[in-house]
Image (spheres, coloured by chain):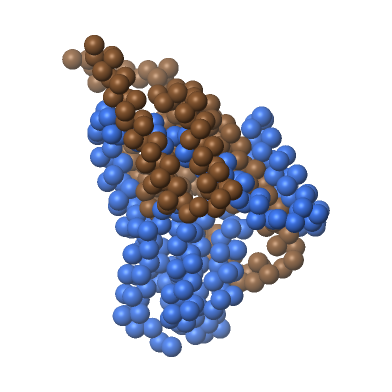
Chain colours: A brown, B blue
Amino acid sequence: MPAPSQALPRPEDQPGQPRSRADLFFSFTWLALQGFGGVLAVVQRELVEKKRWMTREQFVEDWAVAQILPGPNVVNLSLMIGGRHFGLPGALAALAGMLAAPLVIVLLLAALYGSVADLPMAQGALRGMGAVAAGLITATGIKLIAALDKNAMGLGVCIALAALTFGAIALLRWPLVWVLLGVGGGACTWAYRVLGLRDRLEAS
Amino acid sequence: MAPTLTNWTDLFLHFASLSLLAVGGAITTAPDMHRYLVGGQGWLSDAQFTSSIALSQAAPGPNVLFVALIGWNVGLNAGGGPSAGFTAWALALLGVLVTMLATLLPSSVLTYTATRWAHRNRELRAVRAFKTGMAPIVIALLVATGWLLSAAHNQPARDWPLWLLTACATLLVWRTRIHLLWMIGAGAVLGALGIV
């Protein structure tokens, strides 16, 4: 039997990992506090590009699960990342980090400036931040396209599926649930076949 | 209106039932929350509902915090408004607790259990097929979200500076490592000054 992997850290396999539950908590707090108009772009930049807790491919896989399960997506994502490293306590630490500080801030804002959202200047700022946030999320999507290189379905099929999804959601405005069930269901079935063929080839 | 225990239980149960329907994020259930709280029960005014969503978007953090603000306002109303003092603030906090717990508990339990199961069974062909098949779709969803956020501003003559700002932000995030906060800050300043 090989030695327990914890005794032999292999930096080339695991370039980064949360050191502790407190590390998880504070990392997610910092992520959440940067997330104006959506936290996902920040999660990708910090956890994949800077801290290297996960690869681009892992991030896409996790995001797929977080997206398809009910509940706030980034909340699901923090539960998953925290849980992977420290089990349930890790999941709770990441979740608490994601929610605690922003919750206090938003309640303070509500209590102090209940009507700040009505000021023209605040509305203008909100408009500008919204436009930037739209750019952040688009760029995150573009950067993740590279993760499809290793996809077993092949790049051509991936691009066709992505184009179909984009058309259905952005242009035809179909409800997300139907696109996930329809295009997603079809894609998973196709992937199941492809992986089956590949497994058989490898076995023979 | 003095809230009874039944009111709070109803609120909890309603939000908890929406939790498991919130595929694509809690915001997808906002129309139903509006129907229930503003139209049905009359616990919240239309303006309070809208400003809860607007304020949560202006603040940092996950968008789900609009649920906390809704709970806050429901509690505040139940206690007689901000001028009613301590009782109102205490009820507002209770509102936050009830709505957030109800929104997060069912979906989080499901997510945690399902992902632990998937992790233990990650070699299963079905699990691998799900990850492989969904990858191109979720990536396209991100790009589509950016598109939809921009397309909400649909008057070219007025909105072209916004679109330009979005395009610049996209390029900068994609090609450079400039800190995201600088870009969000720049967007806020440009917007507050009325440039975009």
Pick the front one: B133 or B27 = B133
Q: Position of residue B117 (x, y in %)?
A: 25, 40
Q: Position of residue B50 (x, y in %)?
A: 58, 69
Residue occupying image coordinates x 46% and y 74%: B35
- The answer to whether residue B174 is visible is yes
Residue A139 appears left or right of A40: right
Which residue lies most toward the left here?
A1
A112 relative to A99, above or below: below
Q: In which quarter of the image is residue B8?
A: bottom left
Q: Where is residue A117 in the image (x, y as percent from the top left)?
A: 65, 66
Residue B182 appears left or right of B113: right
- Point out the image quarter for the N terminus of chain B: bottom left
Q: Where is residue B134 in the image (x, y as percent from the top left)?
A: 41, 37
- The answer to whether residue A6 is visible is no
Pick the front one: B124 or A202 = A202
Residue occupying image coordinates x 63% and y 69%: A113
Q: Quadrant of residue A145?
A: top right
Which residue lies most toward the bottom here?
B1
Residue occupying image coordinates x 31% and y 80%: B6
Residue occupying image coordinates x 57% and y 41%: B143
